[in-house]
Amino acid sequence: MKNSEGELGRRFRGKEFRTSPPRAVIGLEAEFNLLIDGKRRRPEKIFGDPRRLVRRRMIPRTGKSFQLPAGGAIYFDTGVIEVATPIVELERGCCCRATRLLWEQIGYLRAELDHWSKRRGCQCRLQGFSTHYNFSFPAARKSKSRNPTKVAYLLAHILPAPVLLLAANRQSSAVGVRPRQTRLEITADFTPDPALMLATCAFVAGVVETVLRWEEFGLRQLSRHGMPRLTPFRLRKHSSRRGWRILRDSLGVNPFAADVNAPLWKLRDGRMLSLRAIAAEIVTPFRQQIQRLSDTTTLQHIVAVFAGDARSLLDFPKRPEAYDDAGRVIDWGRRRMRRWSRSRYEKVIHRVIAREPMRLGQKRYRVERMNGWYQVVFREAGTGKRRTFNLDELVRLSGAKRSVPTAARKRKPTKKRRP
């Protein structure tokens, strides 16, 4: 083998060893209230931890979370059940992959709850609470004038109107943007419709990826790129951690209760536009990245929602009933969506959660635990020595072909031909 496992190990233990991915990645989370026989219950009180709910043995993760057999993570967080996708490389089609992954986690959780409730003779429901769209902020893109806080503040002026139309319903209360140390987190209401969740994910991803390529993150970029600006526009502090939110009283008219087709919102240039018209203007500079990170069908769906040719959940007088029983029916068939193959990270993660022994270099390893989203802790099968690999190392090492020395074949003596 060109690079032996020992040589690779020395290299990874040195400067090239990484605890977070060098490339841009995406990840989705969804939070749910647990309803048992119609009453809200704290999952911590009912189950203790996720191992009392999920039947199959799970790989432990950092903190109190566990790796779901469906590929993502599950944990109980201050009274809600939260499931999250593994990280997915930010590349062509990644929004389709990430959305599919989140609904795979929701479907798996729903099946486990059904089994648990059947054994106990009760009814369990998952009530959608929120969805978080996470995008990494690689160190290579950081500078004094370009950091997560500055870009989050700029995004808080771009995202609210379009995200309201794609993700909110009549009982929603906020759209938020939170800067984290190495990522950006956009928070919205849970969307019980997979196609609308994909549209939300694709729109947000396209905006984030485009804005990160702008020269700087000052508000002057809004007029430079033709962004309509609402007045009044009052950002509020996020309810948890740092960040900002648009609430019911932030825009002068409550967007969660008003007619989204009526020209009720005033812009700084004096125009009065509908929420749909505002969103339609905002999407224009981001169309290329939206299409690249999802697909043409998803971009068309987004444009149709903003034009009024496809329905937003704000078009309904009430919140959809599916919101209060999430995962019971997962309808992907309403819109045609391209089937994307698993990404490289996904393939490795599925091998990890299957506890499949992996040959890395010349040695065999068994999975012990996940360390965050990017690292996997193994034990060497022969010596029991603990070793940590990140996903990029696992992709490279597990995909490398072993060069097995070919034994020299004994040549049979050639028979002499008769004259």
Image (tube, rainbow, N blue to C red):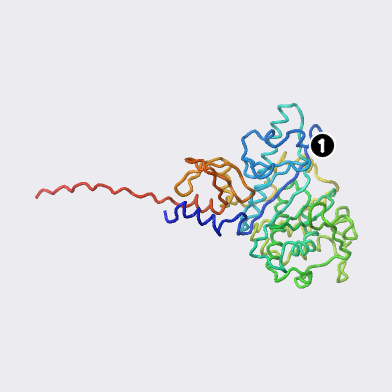
Crowding at label 1, few (<14), some or many (≥20) Cα neighbours within 10 Å?
some
Query: Is 44 or 33 nearer to us in this picture?
Result: 44
Image quarter of residue 178: bottom right
Q: Residue at coordinates 63% horizontally, 64% vertically from top-left?
A: 140
Query: Is 202 or 406 nearer to us in this picture?
Result: 406
Q: Residue 347 in the image: state x and y as whole percent.
A: 56, 48
Query: Is 339 or 173 nearer to us in this picture?
Result: 173
Dot 1: element: strand
255 relative position to 75: left or right: right
Does 359 appear above or below 301?
A: above
Q: Residue at coordinates 76% horizontally, 48% vertically from top-left?
A: 191
Circle 1 residue: 40
355 relative position to 268: left or right: left
Q: Residue furthest left?
A: 419
- The image shows a total of numbered marks equal to 1
Q: Residue at coordinates 87% horizontally, 61% vertically from top-left?
A: 234
Q: Residue 82 in the image: state x and y as whole percent.
A: 72, 43
Given the image, on which type of amino acid does mark 1 rest?
A: Arg
Q: Residue at coordinates 46% horizontally, 49% vertically from top-left?
A: 361
Q: Residue 366 in the image: state x and y as whole percent.
A: 53, 41
Q: Residue 221 in the image: state x and y as whole percent.
A: 76, 70
